[in-house]
Image (cartoon, grey):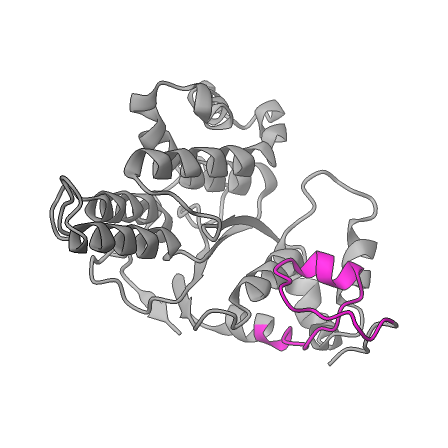
Amino acid sequence: MNSLPEDPQKTSLGYHDFAELRAEGAPYVDKTRFIAELLRMKFKTLLITRPRRFGKSLLLSTLNNFLDCNYLDDPEFEQRLDRRFAGLKISDDTAFCAAHRGQYAVIMLSFGGFARDDYAGSLNFFVFLIMRLCDRYNSLLKRPELSDQERHLFKCCLTLKDQPEKDQRDLVIQAVPLLAKLLRRCYGKKVMVLIDEYDVPLQQAYSLTSSRYSRQEGGALRPDHPDSFYQQMARFIRELFEPIVKPPADDKVRRGQSASAIYRTIMTGCLRVSKESIFTGANNLTVS
């Protein structure tokens, strides 16, 4: 474990952000060796399932900090990474760091803040989630590599809340594969997608639907009813994940690059296997 901070009362409990934890000098159990182990595994989509409070969110945040590239040509980017990973196990492997640290375009999403009690509210959660994600990369609008149609679609994703409600669902589903395609083409980097707490929307939808039905609330539907909140969420999550775990090809890739826009996807959650088969599009899902 890294050296403890001067304040013995300070602990790392509750930290989900690796950069924040390191900046504040909180105690950190060094698990960075898992970065190399993960990247050396053979997978396209990896599902990591562990109980709550097992450090899954911090692990993905650590991966994000280690892998993500310097989009804005920040002159202090490398020095910041040096400080962030100083004294950690991964830094001992200089060859691995040279090959992988800061060498990917990373798209990271967390469903952990999901707390909605109907499908309309759930869609609204994802609308704002996608808007925040795309806003981080709004400089893409200035890139000449985008076609007029791609530029228009990306602008729609940036302003999702202002789009017609009938279009919002489709735009949310298109956003991640579109962003992956643009990042790979514009920066020439392999794209990694990290999704934390993938199962929270499904768990909450199932719990609410079951609870309402058991209490015989007026008009409450069984969880297996096709119009129930749970089934609506299961269909939406399935459609959201399909182009991520089985991404469409990009016909404008650079010579020598794979046509698939997304190199790898890593998800974390508590549910090991979904009975609703939300990963039907993944040909080679690896579960850890």
Q: Quadrant of residue 96?
A: bottom right
From the image, which quarter does the N terminus lie in?
Answer: bottom right
Most foreground residue, 155 or 105: 155
224 shown above or below 31: above
Most foreground residue, 254 or 232: 232
**Which residue ends up furthest to the bottom in the rendered image?**
1
Residue 116 visible somewhere in the drawing: yes
Residue 95 percent location from the top left of the image: 70, 71
Residue 106 percent location from the top left of the image: 56, 50
Q: Quadrant of residue 35?
A: bottom right
From the image, which quarter does the C terminus lie in?
Answer: bottom left
| Left-right relation of 203 to 99 | left
Q: Is residue 260 magenta?
A: no
Residue at (62% x, 23% y) in the render: 142
Residue 81 percent location from the top left of the image: 76, 58
Residue at (59% x, 62% y) in the render: 63
Q: Quadrant of residue 250?
A: top left
Query: Magenta residues: mostly which secondary structure?
Result: loop
**Highlighted range, magenta:** 7-34
| Left-right relation of 197 to 140 | left
| Left-right relation of 136 to 19 | left
Residue 43 visible somewhere in the drawing: no
Residue at (29% x, 50% y) in the render: 205
Most foreground residue, 260 or 48: 48
182 shown above or below 259: above
**Which residue ends up furthest to the right in the rendered image?**
6
